[in-house]
Image (cartoon, helix red, strand yellow):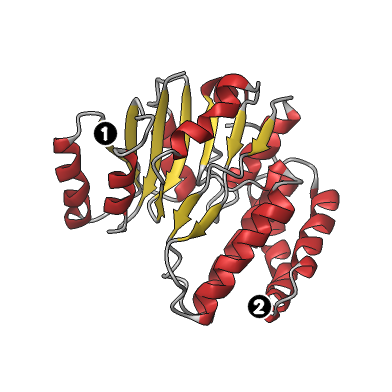
């Protein structure tokens, strides 16, 4: 099964590490697509130099929010499958080989793996994020594949042909959860692959305000996905359980954010007309 590795990028010098890890895979990707959301020429120059040395690397400009960038880049993928990686992630040599196994031999339509810290945490906030992510994949995603983040995942392109692409209306994130819910509702099968892990550099989350902004944005995006897919009641209870299931003071802050995020998501959904249409 041919595969494109799709990297979403915006003004992130760490992408050089990501690209270096992709060309060192035991199973080389058939194509590497860098979908850029509107970076400066200086940031793009790093990628352009890399593309000159490696013929299977393409760079495309798709300005806008993450949903815009992902939807724009996905429209040009011609391989049988696509694997998503973020610009702050680094793949070990056997990552792609391991990640693709469920799609090629086990009858799954999409799958994903967990993340591990790239290095020692340099702040209390980063330490919390690293520990929470380890718990989240093991205790939440393993039991509920609808919670799978898009970074470090692989998909048969047949899924997108059947249900459509990323919904560009998701301006605050959540487009990945929306896609998961639509795929599962259409009868496609997904699974977590614990062995297909990648390193994740979260050093940019080195202060509490940055963490709060991310938590709020994720809460709004997730709630918007739940409204769109008609699963708000069931999913809201589960989301609250996730927060209460991880005993940490930062999660109490996150719990306090949820009512405001829920209201914001409802207002966004009303503004969009409450349409459940697929893109």
> Could you say where residue 261 lies in the image, as x and y percent from the top left?
68, 65
* Distance (Cα) linking label 2 and label 1: 40 Å
Can residue 270 be seen? no
Q: Residue 208: x, y in percent? A: 54, 80
Eyeballing the image, is 181 above or below 45? above
Image location (x, y in percent) of residue 37: 35, 49
Element class at badge 1? strand
Q: Which quarter of the image is occupied by the C terminus?
A: top right
Tell me where residue 249 sits by quadrant: bottom right
Q: Residue at x 52, y 29 (%)?
A: 100
Circles 2, 1 touching at the beta carbon (< 8 Å)? no
As rendered, which of 96 and 237 lies closer to the eye?
Answer: 96
Label 1, residues with CA under 10 Å away: few <14, some 14-19, many ≥20: some
Residue at x 33% of width, y 45% of height? 21
Q: Residue at x 40, y 25 (%)?
A: 77
Q: Residues within 10 Å of mark 2 (few under 14, many from 20)?
A: some
Q: Residue at x 40, y 35 (%)?
A: 5
Residue 52's place in the image compared with 17, above or below, is: above
**Mark identifier at residue 58:** 1
* Residue 23 locus on image (x, y percent): 29, 38
Q: Quadrant of residue 192?
A: top right
Disc marking residue 150: none
Q: Secondary structure at mark 2?
A: helix
Name the foreground residue: 271 vs 230: 230
User: Is 175 displayed left or right of 25 in the figure?
Assistant: right
Please name the residue that numbered disc 2 is placed on.
Answer: 250
- Residue 57 horizontal side relative to residue 228, left or right: left
- First along the sequence among labels 2 and 1: 1
């Amino acid at each position: 099964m041919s595969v494109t590795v799709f990297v979403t990028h915006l003004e992130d010098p760490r992408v050089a590490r990501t690209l270096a890890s992709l060309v060192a895979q035991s199973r080389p990707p058939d194509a590497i697509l860098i979908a850029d959301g509107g970076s400066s020429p200086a940031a793009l120059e790093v990628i352009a130099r890399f593309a000159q040395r490696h013929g299977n690397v393409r760079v495309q400009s798709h300005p806008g929010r993450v949903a815009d960038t992902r939807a724009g880049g996905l429209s040009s993928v011609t391989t049988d499958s696509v694997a998503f990686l973020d610009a702050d992630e680094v793949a070990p040599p056997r990552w792609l080989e391991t990640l693709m196994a469920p799609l090629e031999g086990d009858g799954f339509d999409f799958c994903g793996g967990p993340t591990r810290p790239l290095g020692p945490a340099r702040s209390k906030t980063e330490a919390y994020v690293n520990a929470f992510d380890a718990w989240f994949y093991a205790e939440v995603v393993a039991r509920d594949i609808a919670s799978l983040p898009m970074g470090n995942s692989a998909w048969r392109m047949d899924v997108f042909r059947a249900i459509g692409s990323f919904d560009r209306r998701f301006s605050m994130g959540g487009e990945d959860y929306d896609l998961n819910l639509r795929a599962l509702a259409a009868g496609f099968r997904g699974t977590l692959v614990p062995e297909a892990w990648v390193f994740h550099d979260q050093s940019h989350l080195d202060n509490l305000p940055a963490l709060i902004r991310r938590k709020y944005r994720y809460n709004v995006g997730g709630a918007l996905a739940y409204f769109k897919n008609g699963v708000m009641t069931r999913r809201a209870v589960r989301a609250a359980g996730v927060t209460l299931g991880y005993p940490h003071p930062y999660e109490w802050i996150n719990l306090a954010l949820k009512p405001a995020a829920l209201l914001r998501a409802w207002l966004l959904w009303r503004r969009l007309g409450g349409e459940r249409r697929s893109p």
